[in-house]
Image (cartoon, grey):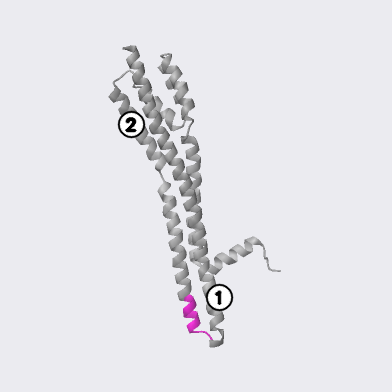
Amino acid sequence: MESTGPLNSILVFMNDGGIFMWIILAVWIVGFIISIERFLKFTIYDSNGPSIMNEVQKYVISNDLGGAIKMCSNSRSFIPKIFKNGLKRANQTTLQMQNAIDATALECIGKVESRIGYINLLANISTLMGLLGTIYGLIQSFEAVGAADPSKKAEILSSGISKAMNTTAIGLISAISLMTIHAILTAKQEKIISAMDEYSIKLLDLLGTRRVEED
């Protein structure tokens, strides 16, 4: 007895669409792998800015820069990393502190933005491959109709067009899902970068206030 389960239906659907279906599926899987990697990295990169700022402020007010640096060293997120390099220059000039913070922030921004663009690119490739697969399927259908028995031409053409449209369907499904993920990750990316900018300025202000009080 032939299997009619969901897996068999999916395999039939994929095979009916031809090689382009499997190409789109491969693109879709690559997009999801990149997306999962970015979600996991963003979980590490992001941090509770207000909480970290309050802790660092306590150390700075008590003039315990070593304690603040040690606390920041225990975190893998980016705000503590920026803070650590800024605190190491706390006894140097404001320009040196600014340069250390900016250099670290630029390094972190590069890591946050890494590979996000690929997800949008793969979404576009899915759409275009779907259309290309459909056009290829239609060409094959019309060629088959030309050589077919006149009484079966309508049936062959209808079946061929139906199968050809499979690639458009899966291409759009892949593109829509990847574009949605891209939008979510882009929003998360902007949040992380905005927080880094905000708390970099706050750290400079805090260290500048400390220096004025010492003078």
User: Between 58 and 111, which is closer to the camera in this rendering?
Assistant: 58
Where residue 71 appears, as percent x and y from the top left, is: 46, 22
Where residue 43 appears, as percent x and y from the top left, is: 50, 37
Question: Which secondary structure dominates the residues rendered in magenta?
Answer: helix
Please name the amino acid that badge 2 sits on: Asp
What kind of element bears circle 1? helix
Q: Is 146 contained in the magenta span?
A: yes
Where residue 73 appears, as percent x and y from the top left, is: 44, 25
Q: In this view, does 203 lie above or below 124?
A: above
| 112 lies left or right of 8 | left
- Upstream in sequence: badge 2 or badge 1: 2
Q: Disc 1 designates what residue? A: 159
Question: Dot 1: few (<14), some (14–19), or many (≥20) neighbours within 10 Å?
Answer: few
Q: Please tell me how many numbered marks the rendered image carries.
A: 2
| 94 lies left or right of 187 | left
For the C terminus, which image quadrant?
Answer: top left
User: Between 202 and 115, which is closer to the camera in this rendering?
Assistant: 202
Q: Residue at x 42, y 21 (%)?
A: 69
Q: Is 114 contained in the magenta span?
A: no
| 3D distance between C-alphas at marks 2 and 1 | 61 Å
Q: Residue at x 45, y 43 (%)?
A: 187
Q: Residue at x 49, y 56 (%)?
A: 176
Q: Residue at x 51, y 70 (%)?
A: 164
Q: Residue furthest bottom?
A: 150
What kind of element bears circle 2? helix
Question: Dot 2: few (<14), some (14–19), or many (≥20) neighbours within 10 Å?
Answer: some
Q: In this view, does 88 lie above or below 11?
A: above
| 99 lies left or right of 57 | left
Q: Disc 2 designates what residue? A: 102
Q: Give the range drawn in magenta.
A: 140-149
